[in-house]
């Protein structure tokens, strides 16, 4: 089973007026992409701890959405094969 783009984040999640969004297979990957973006686009070479916390929380929320969708999908396919 393919597991791609499990975690995602967008600047709008932080209430930023920015259309940036990123997705990756891991929280770390998404966070790293966001750190690069924040440095270039928001002039934030070092992210404040509260921003990091909110980004992590947002990524986790996106993961949970994907995981619960996977559970629903796997249940649906089990039902179909019966
Ligand atoms: Zn941004």
Image (cartoon, rainbow, N blue to C red):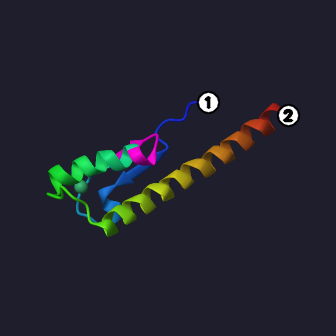
Establish if 7 lies above or below 44.
Answer: above
Establish if 63 lies above or below 80.
Answer: below
Query: Over which residues does the magenta segment extend?
Result: 22-28
Question: Residue at (26%, 53%) from the top-left corner?
Answer: 19
Work out whether residue 20 can be spotted: no
Question: Residue at (38%, 43%) from the top-left corner?
Answer: 29
Establish if 3 lies above or below 41.
Answer: above
Left or right of 47, for residue 24: right
Question: Residue at (18%, 58%) from the top-left corner?
Answer: 44
Split into 4 quadrants, where in the image is the N terminus?
A: top right
Is 23 magenta? The answer is yes
Q: Residue furthest right?
A: 82
* Image quadrant, ligand 1: bottom left
Numbered disc 2: secondary structure: loop
Is 44 magenta? The answer is no
Among numbered discs 2 and 1, the one appearing first in the sequence: 1
Query: For the residues carrying marks 2 and 1, which lies nearer the camera in this image?
Result: 1
Left or right of 2, for residue 17: left
The residue labelled by disc 1 is: 1
Q: Residue furthest bottom?
A: 50
Q: Is mark 1 within 8 Å of ligand 1?
A: no
Q: CA distance from mark 2 to mark 1?
A: 20 Å
Q: How many marks?
A: 2
Establish if 58 lies above or below 27.
Answer: below
Work out whether residue 78 can be spotted: yes
Q: Tell me the crowding category of disc 1: few under 14, some 14 to 19, or many 20 or more residues within 10 angstroms, Cα based.
A: few
Q: Which mark is residue 82?
A: 2
Displayed quadrant of residue 42: bottom left
Residue 50 coordinates in the image, percent (x, y): 33, 69
Question: Residue at (67%, 46%) from the top-left corner?
Answer: 71
């Amino acid at each position: 089973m393919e597991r791609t783009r499990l975690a995602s984040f967008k600047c709008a999640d932080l209430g930023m007026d920015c259309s940036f969004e990123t997705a990756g297979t891991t929280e770390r990957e998404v966070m790293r992409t966001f750190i690069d973006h924040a440095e270039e686009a928001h002039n934030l070479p070092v992210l404040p701890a509260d921003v990091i916390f909110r980004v992590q929380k947002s990524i986790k929320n996106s993961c949970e959405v994907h995981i619960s969708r996977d559970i629903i999908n796997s249940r649906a396919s089990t039902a179909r094969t019966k």
